[in-house]
Image (tube, helix red, strand yellow):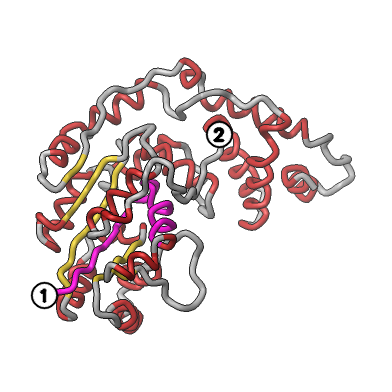
Amino acid sequence: MPRRAFLHVGMPKCATTTIQAALVQRQEALRGLGIAYEMPEGPEAEGQGNAARLAISILRQREEAIAAALDFFSSGTGDVVLSSEAFSALYKSAAVIQFIEALRARGFEVSVIALFRRQDHWLESDFKQHVKGAHTWDGTIAELLEKRTQQDVLNYALFTLYWGKYVGRDRVFTAVIQPGSARRDPVNFVLEQIGAGSLCYGEDADVPLANVSPPTGLIEPARLLKQEMRAAGASAGQVDVALDRFFAEAPGVIAVPKRRFLMPHAQRQAVVDRWKGSNHDLVRRAEHRGAFDVDVAEDPASEVPLDEEARAVLAAWTAARGPAPAPQVQARRGFLRRLLGR
């Protein structure tokens, strides 16, 4: 009887960190079922999953690191779960084919698990992460949409098709995360696919909470703050400190816009329409769960021009932080101190 290797390949911003935290929380119980979710020794990036270093090694074709990781993950006798958002970047890579063959050579039957959000919802979450996370990105959401479109990231049917070519069409298990769904739903989907349905979270269970996003109304002001600081020569660390302070303190000192979305209704509708056919193809698969909602919510607060609103918020924040430095202070240094709240 072959052992099973489950590759949880994301996507990013699709409850991946929550799923990984839940797998750690259920680690001992999983072992009792003969399923290993083991963390390698050494420093790990928080919230990146047990296979983060492995996925990066595959992407960079570091053969020795891949072999060492395979030795670690295959050292037991049962099934294994390997989880990383970085796997999602490998779906067109020839290197991942070699990796899957290496798993098979070690006696594993390989399956893939992926979760998706509707493209407009996913893009907004992706943009928030780019703004608040350790990214150099400071472009607009429209620019990120163009980038992700060119990368085929939003074509979920194509994503699934490629993984199906590598592991077999009937071994790719996918699901949609619906807006407003319970935090336990994507976690339980993964547990069911790996054969741990008995460990699913009930309604009153304490599901790990991970990677909570700031209010939508603060995202574009934060991007402008980040952009201005980087243009003035601020270091990545200085930018991170300023953004953390902004997200933590701004709700208490300025009026936060009540918008639910970064993109206006027409733009979100265009995104949904563009990928409606791809989503339909994905939903038709027997191994897929859930349908993509096609209703694009309207929200008057989200129709306010984003740039104009964000500049007003940032101006209010700067004013709330105190007066500008005296003219005799070096301009660049004073600018950075003002933005950093020092």
Residue highlighted by disc 1: 1
Disc 2 crowd rating (10 Å Cα; few below 14, some 14-19, many 20+) is: some
Depth check: 226 or 197 in front? 197
Among the two numbered marks 1 and 2 on one chain, the one whose residue lies closer to the N terminus? 1
Residue 81 is situated, as x and y percent measured from the top left of the image, at 29, 66
Q: Residue at x 44, y 18 (%)?
A: 299
* Towards the viewer: 28 or 37: 28
- Viewer-side residue, 198 vs 42: 198
Q: Quadrant of residue 39?
A: bottom left
Q: What label sits on residue 215 in the rendered view?
A: 2
Name the amino acid, label 1: Met
> Would you say residue 280 sits in the magenta stretch?
no
Q: Position of residue 144 (x, y in %)?
A: 40, 41
The verdict on residue 2 being magenta is: yes
> How many numbered tags mark residues here?
2
Above or below, 131 against 113 in this view is above
Residue 76: x and y, percent? 29, 80
Residue 158 image label: none
